[in-house]
């Protein structure tokens, strides 16, 4: 078996001095070599691991032939955002895990699994470099209809693209001043460069999609207002923008951030370029990040860069109440964090924030051991009595997940939600309790991956098309 073609990356000492992209991508020669490793299985199981159903076998076969243009169009049949997804999809839990080179019981993809995501990224970047446009023959069947998409995150962008390809006139309403949702405010430029994000959003606009920013649904206008403005249907891709907290003593001390606020300040408001941009963020000499997901890794790696750029010695620690095996973050991001100097404390649970003069200066913690699996399927952390110790910290970033934002649902009682504030939908059609209003992404299923949200956006688009047929 040929060894996987290793992706080129910036060296750790180069990375931490800037927000430049870390992973550099395959050259044509490297992409060809990696594609040649694919067995072109008769029944390609990898496709079942892709939430948007890309024909992985076909596009890799086209790479093998050096026909990168056809590979681009093959991916484009299912996914309008190959350069984005090729960079941020957790492939080790999805398509690569379903690769035949991965054994059934492995928790994530084998190192021998085909680097499908890097090949997708290569193809997407090839299309961008050569100015390729998706081959779309717009249908006139739905040209009489207008659909409003609320939220320009992954679910909204995906839904809008599918509808626009079929001739529907689509307007996206975004609450922030820039489109992209979590792609824009949540993911740092060293993982997703802004020129890549902007390029693929511009491609969406070329399909006729209009994006209206600074529009807060539930405040600027209500759901009924949109329906009364001539939109035949509405898709809600609101995301889960409300941070979760630990609810332990001292959590209101100064210099304790939610990862949501911290990353938004840096990524969307360019705090790392202060004073050129007037959105400062406290940096700190001893930074602690609480959590084990991708957001925690993004926050830790961002914080460390801010320390280095501002002349401080890097000192960032991630504390997580389970072990590294149970961490939901991508393996690649964990390894990058380690290489860059982020420290990890596992089996540690915060119980209290302590401070002086209103500012945090430490975290009281307990050691944990793992018990039986809980509802997540992971072994439950059990605090060990008498194991208390203190972690010094002058800045703390809490990255333990997000909850549903209730700005819209609080003023729309007819929109049914569950006890967590997530919108309830028909599981088959993704239609909400209001006829003609559909929803998908994190506001429906809770916090998930970008590609899962895109998959829901596509599903909702198909349901919206069926709904529009019924209104002819």
Image: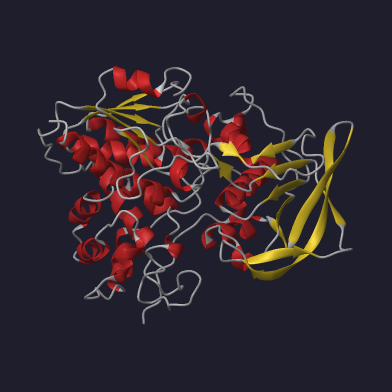
The residue under the point 55% across, 42% down is: 419
Res. 267 image quadrant: top right
Quarter of the image for residue 343 reads bottom right
Q: Residue at x 40, y 69 (%)?
A: 5
Q: Residue furthest bottom?
A: 1
142 and 113: which is toward the camera:
142
Q: Which image quadrant: the N terminus? A: bottom left
Asked whether, in this view, residue 168 is left or right of residue 304, the answer is left
Report how many numbered discs are placed on residues in the image: 0
305 displayed left or right of 86: right
Q: Is residue 368 visible?
A: yes
* Residue 202, x across and y down, in percent: 31, 33
**Considering the image in quadrants, where does the C terminus appear?**
top left
Q: Position of residue 184 (x, y in %)?
A: 47, 36
Q: Residue at x 82, y 47 (%)?
A: 352
Q: Is residue 114 above or below residue 253?
A: below
Q: Between residues 321 and 408, which one lies in front from this camera angle?
A: 408
> Measured from the top left, where is residue 429 in percent x and y?
30, 45
**Residue 129 seen in this snapshot:** no
Where does residue 404 sit, x and y in percent of width and height?
Answer: 53, 38
The residue depicted at 25 percent of the width and 19 percent of the height is 230
How are the colours assigned in the image?
Answer: secondary structure
Indicate the quadrant where residue 225 lies: top left
């Amino acid at each position: 078996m040929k060894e996987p073609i290793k992706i080129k990356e910036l060296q750790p000492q180069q990375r931490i001095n800037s927000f430049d992209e870390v992973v550099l991508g395959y050259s044509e020669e490297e992409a060809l070599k990696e594609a040649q490793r694919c067995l072109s299985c008769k029944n390609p199981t990898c496709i079942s691991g892709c939430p948007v159903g890309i024909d992985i076998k076909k596009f890799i076969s086209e790479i093998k032939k050096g026909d990168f243009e056809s590979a681009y169009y093959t991916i484009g049949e299912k996914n309008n955002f190959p350069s984005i997804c090729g960079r941020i999809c957790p492939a080790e839990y999805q398509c690569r895990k379903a690769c035949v080179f991965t054994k059934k019981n492995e928790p994530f993809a084998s190192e021998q699994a085909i680097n499908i995501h890097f090949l997708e990224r290569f193809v997407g970047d090839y299309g961008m470099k050569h100015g390729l446009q998706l081959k779309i023959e717009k249908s006139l069947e739905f040209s009489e209809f207008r659909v409003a998409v609320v939220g320009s995150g992954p679910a909204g962008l995906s839904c809008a693209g599918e509808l626009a390809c079929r001739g529907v006139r689509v307007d996206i309403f975004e609450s922030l001043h820039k489109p992209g949702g979590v792609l824009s405010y949540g993911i740092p430029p060293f993982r997703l460069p802004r020129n890549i994000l902007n390029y693929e959003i511009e491609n969406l606009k070329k399909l006729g999609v209009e994006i209206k920013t600074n529009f807060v649904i539930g405040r600027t206008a209500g759901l009924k207002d949109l329906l009364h403005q001539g939109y035949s249907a509405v898709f809600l891709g609101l995301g889960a923008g409300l941070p979760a907290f630990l609810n332990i003593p001292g959590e209101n001390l100064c210099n304790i951030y939610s990862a949501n606020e911290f990353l938004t300040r840096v990524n969307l408001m360019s705090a790392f370029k202060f004073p050129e941009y007037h959105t400062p963020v406290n940096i700190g000499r001893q930074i602690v990040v609480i959590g084990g997901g991708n957001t925690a890794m993004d926050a830790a790696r961002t914080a460390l860069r801010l320390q280095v750029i501002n002349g401080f010695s890097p000192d960032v620690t991630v504390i997580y109440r389970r072990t590294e095996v149970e961490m939901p973050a991508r393996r690649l991001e964990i390894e990058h964090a380690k290489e860059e100097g982020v420290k990890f404390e596992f089996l540690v649970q915060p119980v209290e924030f302590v401070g002086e003069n209103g500012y945090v200066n430490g975290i009281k913690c307990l050691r944990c051991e793992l018990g039986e699996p809980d509802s997540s399927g992971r072994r439950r952390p059990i605090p060990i009595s008498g194991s208390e110790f203190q972690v010094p910290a002058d800045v703390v970033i809490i990255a333990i997940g997000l909850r549903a934002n209730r700005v819209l649902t609080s003023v729309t009682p007819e929109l049914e939600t569950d006890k967590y504030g997530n919108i309830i939908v028909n599981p088959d059609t993704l239609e909400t309790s209001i006829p003609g209003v559909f929803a998908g992404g994190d506001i429906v299923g809770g916090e998930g991956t970008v590609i899962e949200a895109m998959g829901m956006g596509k599903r909702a688009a198909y349901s919206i098309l069926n709904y529009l047929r019924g209104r002819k």
